[in-house]
Every structure is written in C-alpha cells, then in structure tokens.
Amino acid sequence: GYSIVVDTSDSVYTTGYFQGTADFDLGASTANLTSAGNYDIFILKLISASAPTISTISASSITPSTAILTGNITATGGVSSTIRGFDIGLDTSYTVTDITESGSYSTGAYELNARDLSCNTTYHYRAYSTNSIGTSTGSDDVFTTPFCPSSSSSFSGGAQAISNYLNLILSPV
C-alpha cells in the first residue's frame, strides 16, 4: 500500500514501493534509486520550505569610519541560509555598499563590520539572508558616525621661539 502523512511543520511523508529505477527528485535534476530486487520500499519526506525570517539589530561600536552591524536569522524556512549580510546606504535605496558572507547558516545572531564609512554621516542599513527558496530582509535601521577627529593644534617655531618668548616675559622693563 501507499501512505501520505503531513506533520505539524507541513512536511509531507509518503511511503510506497517501486521496481527497477525510480526518480525521487521533484525538480529538473534526478535522484534515481534502483531496486535491489523485485520490489523495494521507500519513505520520502518533502519539506515545506520558505525564505528565511530575519531581523535587524541595532548597530554597535560606532567609530568615525566603522560600525558593527548585527542581524538575527530567526527561522531558516526549512533550508539552511547560504548567504547573510547587510545592505547599507544613505537612504533606503541602500546604494553605498553590501556586506556579505557565504556559508551554511542556521538560526542565530551574526555580526559583520562595516568599514570605510564617512565621518558625521547617517547610514541606513538592514540585515538580509538567502536560502535556496529566496531572500528576506529585516527592517530598516539607522546609525550616525561621529565627527572626524580634529587634528591637534601644534606649536610652531621650535626652541628659538620659546626662548624669545621667555626672554620677553622675563626681561626687566
């Protein structure tokens, strides 16, 4: 007999039997299994997948030229994320830069360092994550880099200028 069951995560399980060679892949590629005898049985799990769910967390350690940005993958959508990162811009078109890392990511917070920022500038940013189903973005957030450090004042004139100054204030009138 054949059987179909749906679990609480909306994954579908099917059972049955086959003879010869059967393709168990639902897409264009193939996942062939060949029977070892007259008939073989199978259990097939089809995962209900979606794009990941992600949130943007406040920036930290903001300097005139860098900031640490934090995102949180709160749900994978049933498939591991392969890319995660941040869109950054002067407005919500996010055209300044894109910080990305690739790998295999499950749920949890991640941090990436935004570099080469301009002093005293307000930036918009949002976290994003991509899996084989699609890309999701977190909400827009903003941070402002501090003013650039001013160059320190320096005394010019050297030892001779100091000597002349001291002679002037110490000379009797």
Image (tube, rainbow, N blue to C red):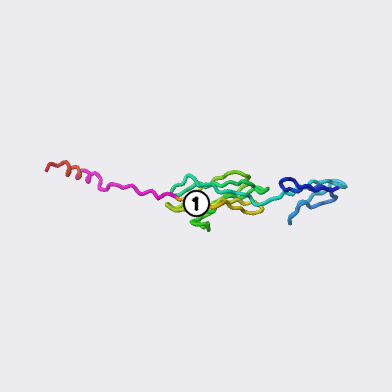
Is 125 colored magenta in this rendering? no
Q: Position of residue 24 (x, y in %)?
A: 78, 51
The foreground one among 78 and 9 is 9
Q: How far across and down, in percent of the image, does residue 102 sit?
A: 60, 49
User: Which residues lie in the magenta part?
Assistant: 145-164
In the displayed image of the protein, which residue is found farthest to the right? 38
**At 79% across and 52% down in the image, what residue appears?**
23
Query: How many numbered discs sit on the rendered protein?
Result: 1
Toward the front, the furthest residue is: 8
Q: Residues within 10 Å of mark 1 (few under 14, many from 20)?
A: some
Q: Nearer the viewer, residue 169 or 73?
A: 73
* Magenta stretch, main secondary structure class: loop
Residue 69 located left or right of residue 159: right
Q: Is residue 15 left or right of residue 127?
A: right
Whole-percent x, y for residue 127 in the image: 56, 50
Left/right of residue 114 with respect to residue 46 in the rendered view:
left
Above or below: residue 91 compared with residue 164: below
* Residue type (three-letter) at the residue carrying disc 1: Val
**Residue 153 painted magenta:** yes
Which residue sits at x=17%, y=43%? Answer: 169
- Residue that carries the numbered disc 1 in the rendered image: 142
User: Helix, strand or loop at disc 1?
Assistant: strand
Where the C terminus falls, by quadrant?
top left
